[in-house]
Image (cartoon, grey):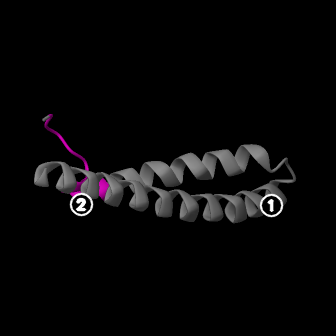
């Protein structure tokens, strides 16, 4: 029972961290995408998507590099 509780708390920690990262990346992508779109006089959707996926890739790299225990590599 204790192992299940520890596993659930670890999964909750990863989910909450992921949600915080997604909100931050979304806000950055929305503002940076609008800025890029206004600089090049193009629509806002493509630059926002590019910045969003670049932000997610950067966040994934940072988590993998500096917080490797957050991503489980073994199965139970």
The residue tagged 1 is: 39
Residue 47 in the image: state x and y as whole percent.
71, 49
Extent of the magenta region: 63-75
From the viewer's perspective, is 40 left or right of 58?
right
From the viewer's perspective, is 28 left or right of 7?
right
Give the mark count: 2
Residue 40 in the image: state x and y as whole percent.
81, 54
Q: Residue at x 25, y 56 (%)?
A: 10
Q: Which residue is farthest front?
A: 1
Lower sequence index among marks 1 and 2:
1
- Above or below, 1 relative to 16: above
Count residues near mark 2 (Cα–Cα under 10 Å), then give few for <14, some for 14-19, many for 20+.
few
Q: Which mark is residue 67?
A: 2
Foreground residue, 47 or 72? 72
Residue 62 visible, this orientation = no
Residue 51 visible, this orientation = yes
Helix, strand or loop at disc 2? loop
């Amino acid at each position: 029972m204790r192992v299940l509780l520890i596993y659930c708390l670890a999964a909750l920690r990863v989910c909450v961290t992921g949600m915080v990262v997604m909100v931050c990346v979304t806000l950055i992508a929305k503002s940076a995408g609008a800025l890029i779109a206004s600089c090049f006089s193009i629509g806002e959707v493509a630059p926002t998507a590019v910045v969003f996926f670049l932000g997610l890739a950067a966040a994934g790299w940072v988590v993998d590099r500096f917080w490797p225990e957050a991503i489980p590599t073994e199965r139970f």
